[in-house]
Amino acid sequence: MSRLVVENLSIRFGGLLAVEDVSFSVEPGEIFAVIGPNGAGKSTVFNLISRLYEPSGGAIRYGDADLLRYRAHQITGLGVARTFQNIELFENATVLDNLLVGRHHRMRRNLLREMIFPPAQRREEHDARLKVEQVIDLLDLAHLRYERIRDLPYGARKNVEIARALCSEPSLLLLDEPASGLNHEETDDLAFWLEDIRADLGVTLVMVEHDMGLVNRMADRVLALHNGRVLALGSPEEVRGHPAVQEAYLGGVA
């Protein structure tokens, strides 16, 4: 399993230094949370790691790979997947079809291959369907597999987006505010599934999250950001008790 290492990461938008000299690492198998008030730079850091933004300076490595040498569409091949604050699914397609799209990059499908090696292609498609079914079972989506995304409640859509990311077989999954918009029961379900994803699939999880209850319950370590800079890094208890974090994020209340 690979380790994510972020070193001295910075990005400037015009005259605004949105992220400044941010460094941290995420160990294999860890659940790692990034917290901070709105505008702290949390999603910007995610966009830098997932190569949607080009940094002004710094380094990002995952295992032996220098992520800055790859484009956004290439990093799934390195085992990195992500979800977004705003759900990005195909509204008119079924849950199953959306998950098969998530599996697409693992399939080496092309016309010449299909003509020369049809049995191999069929095996690949069979293996893809088995992986999708594994994810469906893991996240309790069997009863929704043929439902269209547009007909699903918000919480189910969030779950499908996580499932689609998992279908690419990542070893590192970036979750951008996975509990946003969920009620208490749905958040409890999310916590259960996140632990299953780590335990059953061996996936390292990094999440940007505002729900401090979920962070305290799930995270092994927490990175607190404010105005694009690192305030604190440590266990949930250590970060929660840090005076700068209490002032910036918790309003001075422990």
Image (spheres, helix red, strand yellow):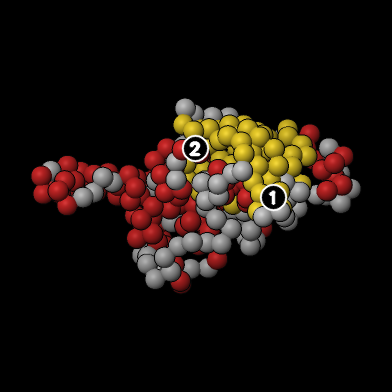
Q: Is residue 142 above or below residue 218?
A: below
In the drawing, does residue 130 fall left or right of residue 61? left
Look at label 1 and name its amino acid.
Answer: Ala
Q: Which mark is residue 18?
A: 1
Q: Residue at x 55, y 66 (%)?
A: 154
Measured as percent of width and height from the top left, residue 95 is found at 40, 61
Q: Residue at x 61, y 36 (%)?
A: 58
Residue lying furthest right:
252
Look at label 2 and name its amino acid.
Answer: Leu
Element type where label 2 sits in the image = helix
Residue designated by label 2: 67
Of 176 and 229, the residue lying toward us: 229
Measured as percent of width and height from the top left, residue 180 is found at 64, 58
Of 100 and 10, the residue lying toward us: 10
Structural crowding at the residue carrying mark 2, measured as other residues with C-alpha within 10 Å and reported as few (<14), some (14–19) or many (≥20): many
Q: Residue at x 29, y 49 (%)?
A: 129
Residue 48 seen: yes
In the drawing, does residue 32 fall left or right of residue 123? right
Q: Earlier in the sequence, mark 2 or mark 1?
A: 1
Measured as percent of width and height from the top left, residue 47 is found at 57, 49
Residue 32 seen: no
Q: Residue at x 34, y 60 (%)?
A: 97
